[in-house]
């Protein structure tokens, strides 16, 4: 049987109703969403270069990489710790095929050729890793994907002819066309925002498409889906391929941001950071990873100064990140999104109490 069984209900909605449903699914019927969207669009006019790139652009990049993990964990029930590895692989391929200061490593291809090649190879890399991971479940999936990430880190750290060893590849060329340097602050921010928006809407769409619904069925009851004729492993591998492409886009943005890539960018600790970002934000909705990424970037950027202000060692800023992670997970299994939903339900219940009951007579 095919990967996805396509069925068309006889009572399909009219186009107007479908558009309304689509807007509802994307939550654009809420004023707060429009407000956030407007703020993101006008951010270059209200923020300086530091906040624009180091805070908001970095949030969008890490959020996009964590979004790929959220798609696998939230819709497929597969927790993958190799998503940053896939992003790092894409970044390395941009450096290897493109232009950089390491002329003995980089092939010198133009960006419009090196970038699609990097995305393709990273997607294949993530798909092959997923093909190994789908043969396991639960903690074993986590361990296999973590092992892939650790192996890639040590390989890049020890390989000099291709990956530049522990120093990595530096001064990587970024796109310049139409007379615009797309790595300058404002153009780069809009490129990052556009890619993040594309990935967000893509995940929203796929999650409601027949493939996404079948994947959620595989997550909930794989044995029953197999009995219905669905290829469980094929759906899972396809999910890894889709997630790998999203992670690869984040990796390309990351290497354009820093103009260098080194093994430290794909370390085991960095892989776990992506998991923390996804869990803190929430793994049931695509907006969760971006919320988690914003919290993570804020803590990583300002926690050091905060600790020093209180006379503590600034290098222990990860202690605050860990404590925040434990507090959020303790109070909500779905991260900040879960806390927000719980608060909304409690306020809605409180508003209904005074006049919610029906009188007699």
Image (cartoon, rainbow, N blue to C red):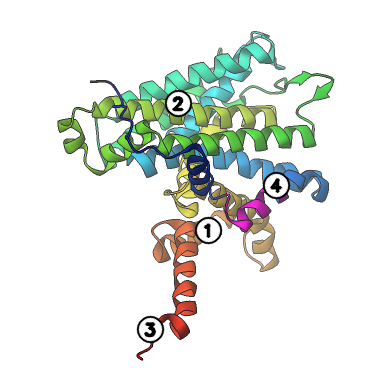
Q: Looking at this view, name the residue that lies furthest to the front.
A: 361
* Residue shown at the point (62%, 51%) measured from the top left: 300
Q: Which mark is residue 40?
A: 4
Q: Is residue 4 above or below residue 59?
A: above
Q: Secondary structure at mark 1?
A: helix
- Answer with mark 3 or mark 2, whichever residue precedes in sequence: 2
User: Quadrant of residue 162 in the image?
Assistant: top right
Q: CA distance from mark 1 to mark 4?
A: 30 Å
The residue pinned by badge 2 equals: 152
Question: Could you give the CA–CA distance between mark 4 and mark 2, rounded to whole angstroms?
Answer: 35 Å
- Judged left or right of residue 34, residue 177 is right
Q: Is residue 167 visible?
A: yes
Camera-side residue: 102 or 83? 83
Which x, y percent locates residue 225? 21, 35
Label 3 to label 1, Cα distance in Å?
Answer: 52 Å
* Residue 142 visible in this rendered orientation of the protein: no
Q: Which residues are magenta?
A: 28-38
Residue 319, label in figure: 1
Residue at mark 3 to residue at mark 2: CA–CA distance: 64 Å
Q: How many marks?
A: 4
In this figure, which residue is indicated by the disc labeled 3? 358
SS of the residue at dot 2?
Answer: helix
Q: Nearer the viewer, mark 3 or mark 1?
A: 3
Label 3 packing within 10 angstroms: few (<14), some (14-19), many (20+):
few
116 w.r.t. 331: above or below: above
Which is more toward the observer, 89 or 189? Answer: 189
- The first of marks 1 and 4 along the sequence is 4
Mark nearer the N terminus (3 vs 1): 1
């Amino acid at each position: 049987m095919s990967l996805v069984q396509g069925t068309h209900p006889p009572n399909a909605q009219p186009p107007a109703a479908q558009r309304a449903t689509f807007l509802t699914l994307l939550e654009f019927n809420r004023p707060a969403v429009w407000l956030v969207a407007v703020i993101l669009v006008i951010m270059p006019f209200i923020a300086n270069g530091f906040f624009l790139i180091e805070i908001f652009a970095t949030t969008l990049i890490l959020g996009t990489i964590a979004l790929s993990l959220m798609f696998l964990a939230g819709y497929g029930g597969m927790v993958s710790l190799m998503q940053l590895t896939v992003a790092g692989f894409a970044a390395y391929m941009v450096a290897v095929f493109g232009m950089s200061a390491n002329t003995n490593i980089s092939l010198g291809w133009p960006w419009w050729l090196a970038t699609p090649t990097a995305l393709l190879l990273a997607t294949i890399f993530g798909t092959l890793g997923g093909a190994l991971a789908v043969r396991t479940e639960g903690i074993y999936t986590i361990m296999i994907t973590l092992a892939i990430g650790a192996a890639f880190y040590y390989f890049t750290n020890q390989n000099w002819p291709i990956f530049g060893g522990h120093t990595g590849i530096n001064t990587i060329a970024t796109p310049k066309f139409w007379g615009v340097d797309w790595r300058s602050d404002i153009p780069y921010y809009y490129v990052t925002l556009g890619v993040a928006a594309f990935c967000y809407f893509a995940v929203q769409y796929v999650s409601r498409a027949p493939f996404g619904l079948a994947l959620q069925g595989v997550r909930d009851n794989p044995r029953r889906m197999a009995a219905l004729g669905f290829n469980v492993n094929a759906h899972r591998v396809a999910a890894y391929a889709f997630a790998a492409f999203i992670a690869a886009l984040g990796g390309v943005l990351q290497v354009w941001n820093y103009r260098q890539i080194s093994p430290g960018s794909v370390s085991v600790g960095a892989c776990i950071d992506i998991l923390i970002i996804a869990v803190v934000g929430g793994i049931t909705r695509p907006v969760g990873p971006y919320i988690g990424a914003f919290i993570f970037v804020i803590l990583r950027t300002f926690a050091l100064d905060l600790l020093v202000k209180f006379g503590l060692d600034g290098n222990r800023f990860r202690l605050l990140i860990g404590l925040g992670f434990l507090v959020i997970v303790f109070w909500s299994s779905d991260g900040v999104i879960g806390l927000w939903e719980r608060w909304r339900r409690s306020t809605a219940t409180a508003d209904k109490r005074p006049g919610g009951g029906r009188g007699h007579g």
